[in-house]
Image (cartoon, rainbow, N blue to C red):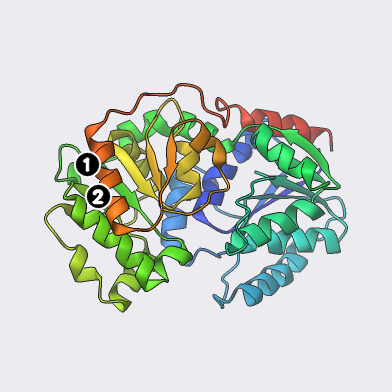
Amino acid sequence: MERIVIIAGTRPEIIKIAPIMRRLQEGKNKYVFVYTGQHYDYQLSSQIISDLELPVPDYNFKLKSKISSVQIAEIMTNLEKISKQKNDIILVQGDTNSVLAASLFAIKQNKKLVHVEAGLRSFDWRMPEEHNRRMVDHISDYLLAPTKESKQNLINEKVNGKIFVTGNTVMDAVKEHIKLSEKKSLSQNSIKFNEYVLATFHRSENVDDKKNLQNIIEGIIKSNLPIVIPLHPRTKKMLKKFNLYKKIETKNVQIIPPQGYLDFLSLMKNCKFIVTDSGGIQEESTSQFLAKRVIVLRNSTERPEAIENGNAILLQLNQQKISKQLKFEWNHNFKKINKSPYGNGDASKKIIKILKKI
């Protein structure tokens, strides 16, 4: 197997590439781990690297700008300095600016490009991730789709690369770490409620828009349910900017710091259900080890399988609808669905088999 250059820039990417790195280590295969530093809270990212018992990145870029186009240029320039071997295989996961930058670098340098989690589509052109994932899919040599639906999206678009269905590596991550989270996590000790709803929201279209953010906050408060919010730095910043932070400081809402991976797994396992705008949580919730109902605070999703599976429901950002749905979910027991559309936790093994044939 040629040397694999694994490039990640955000916490979700690290979580999803961790099982692949572990399989490479087990097989004593050569790889280089590059962390682009796109996620501006490095402490949280380093905590997840520690939680997942991953090696320290071989290269850590410290991006100077938060502007997308400048970030992409910085990452490409830095990659130019470190990936000089002709036969390097570039492996990326997801749809961030780091993924797009690494993919553009790969095609310009005539290196093989492997896109893990290919074929996701929201068909919502307002989402910057939709731009990224479409471009990356059309320049990738190997497209590793998590589901049959995502494979069909790629076929419909007539992409040039080879398509494989592997399942989603996030299922591997949950499977491999759920027991460890039960042993090591202390997050439950700080929760003041016996039963609670877990809420997370950080997407720019939700938190950078005052009306949308206000609707989410008002909906949560009006539900009068016990809510635990691990507050994302971006969300905290915008809550304060829009003078909404004090509004959320009520008896039924407990704000806690952002959590490491093991602590967050524990919170997901022990909550009654989840309210989120996260893509990864929509997938994780379908794991047999979690099996949680998820209210998705978005108009569209690139993960329709979770909706079709019955685990998730899309909800418009209307405070009355949010409050009503939260109360409904609280009073109705979610019927556990054992089979996940994202696989059974062996995606990383399938991916290694594909890499060996490149």
167 vs 286, left or right, is right
Quarter of the figure with residue 235: bottom left
Question: Residue at the location (27% across, 61% down)?
Answer: 217
Task: Single out the residue that lies furthest toward the left.
Answer: 251
Question: Residue at the location (63% across, 55% down)?
Answer: 95
* Residue tagged 1: 196
How far apart are the alpha carbons under marks 2 and 1? 7 Å
Vertical comparison of 76 with 138: above or below: below
Answer yes or no: do the residues labelled 2 and 1 have beta carbons within 8 Å?
Answer: yes
Indicate the position of residue 215 as horizontal and vertical percent values.
Answer: 31, 63
Front-most of residues 127 and 240: 127
* Residue tagged 2: 228
Question: Residue at the location (47% across, 66% down)?
Answer: 204
Quarter of the figure with residue 347: top right
Q: In the rendered structure, which amino acid carries the disc numbered 1?
A: Tyr
Judging from the image, what secondary structure is the residue with disc 1 in?
loop
Front-most of residues 236 and 62: 236
Q: Residues within 10 Å of mark 2 (few under 14, many from 20)?
A: many
Q: In the rendered structure, which amino acid carries the disc numbered 2?
A: Val
Does residue 280 appear in the picture of this structure? yes
In the picture, the disc for residue 356 is none
Question: Residue at the location (17% across, 63% down)?
Answer: 249
242 vs 341, left or right, is left
Vertical comparison of 148 with 103: above or below: above
